[in-house]
Image: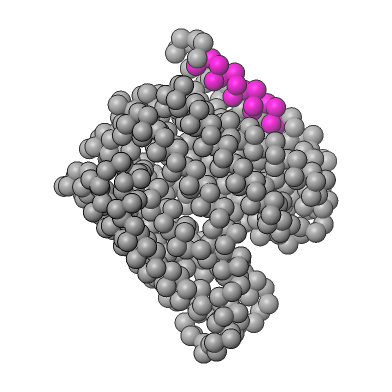
Amino acid sequence: MNMRETPAARHTYVQILKSTMVIGGSSLVTMIFAVVRNKAVALLLGPEGVGLMGIFNSIADIAQTIAGLGVQSSGVRQIAEAVGTGDDAKIARTASVLRSVSIALGLAGTIMLAALAFPVTWFTFGDHQHVIGVALLSVGIFFRLASAGQTALIQGLREISTLARINMLAAFFATVVTIPLVYLFGADGIVPSLVAAAGATLMVSWWYSRRMLRHTPDLSGAQFREEFAGLVRLGLVFMISGLLTLGSAYVVRIIVLQQGGVAAAGLYQAAWALGSLYAGFILQAMGTDFYPRLTAIANDHAACNRMVNEQAQVSMLLAGPGVLATLTFAPFVMWLFYSPEFYAAADLLRWICLGMLLRIIAWPMGYIVLAKGEEAIFFWTEVAATAVHVGLAWLLVSKFGVAGSAAAFFGLYLWHGALIYMFARKLTGFRWSAANRRIGLVFLAASALIFSATVLLPLWQATALGTLAVVLSGLYTLKLLVELVPPERLPRPIRKWVLR
């Protein structure tokens, strides 16, 4: 047992692990449904169908981000702050405005995307072949934003278990409607499936949120304007961040589409979806639990830096073995989750996994900027990240083909991680702990070794070396995680092994 950890620190590690497991558990179920859905689309439509689905999803994501004005993210914070006051009337007012604004923005988003269907289709595909699909997709924007307002209320009330159930049920219904529609109508069923999935999510979120805060308060015009201004003022910061992230991903897909066609876009989409799955467990936990806790202590630099190091330590330990396993078995993973037609995406998946490892290391530091309220730094780092990502993609895809798009993501986080560390040092004097430097060195070196082996060695030798690294890293991770948790909180079989 590591005696350097205080009881308070051990409690923090337990909280981090617990929140990650709860959120990760629901994400695992969601991932399973996503895998079934993606596998069906891959088998029925091939890389072209997967590419089209990815492009339509990108259009919907961007439209939702613009029309939503960041209200979902700001709504979570506004509701949480209202809950913190203990004032039921304020909670009800904030919730009522959040719901009304979300519905209004959903209607505006539908009208916006429908009106811009021709230029959006032309910019994306270079023709008007899919204009009806884009126009139909606009209906899904209303469903998405109306649902987002309800899930923001649930998250703000800290009903995390309810939110997990909504995510799992939404994934189930999305799978149930997508597979039959794609089977019956082929590529023409992609957009209807996306709209139907969004509608199912709205129904599930309404079913759970309807039992919360049933009382609708009487709001004066001044009270509505005050609540609305608070939502939008904070939401615009989140909107800009989300728009830049989604916009860069959208432009990268356009670069791939123009350079390699729809099939190449499908390979990129498949690799991106798989590379994001495992990392998503950890990143979602950061946004749901870590960020609010960090905000509460942001003015205490020592406590803030300690919490960031603790979160980063657990995140690296949980992510490292999974990244190494994906690097090692990338061709098999593409076959398992998609089909043999996607073998060529294995190299893309490896580059994306390297970038995701750097992303997981950098994100805890990035929350320092948000927790400190440094909106200008946050804005300009997001702008710079977008420029770097798109610039690298444009340069590398033209030279190395579709694999360059994934290498650009890795290059982005090499640069972005260094930049965020510099700002974290400036704002709070942040430094990596000795334990995190050691853990980071172990996993980064192991990742570089396995990646190099897949390039330089025959497949069986690279796989054997990678398998050994995965087993050793898993034991290493288990040992360190056990040391972070009080013995009485460990499962009985592990506790017996530790105390032996």
Residue lying at the far left of the rendered structure = 184
Where residue 111 sits: x, y (%)? 34, 66
Determine whether, in the image, residue 272 is placed left or right of residue 14: left
Residue appearing at x 49%, y 85% in the figure: 215
**Relative height, residue 237 to residue 346 (above, below):** below
Where residue 317 sits: x, y (%)? 64, 36
Residue appearing at x 66%, y 60% in the figure: 292
**Relative height, residue 82 to residue 235 (above, below):** below
> Is 448 in the magenta?
yes
Does residue 486 appear in the picture of this structure?
Answer: no
* Residue extent of the magenta highlight: 439-454
Which quarter of the rendered picture does the N terminus lie within? top right
The answer to which image quadrant residue 236 occupies is bottom right
> Is 443 in the magenta?
yes
Residue appearing at x 36%, y 33% in the figure: 258
Which quarter of the rendered picture does the C terminus lie within? top right
Where residue 226 sits: x, y (%)? 60, 79
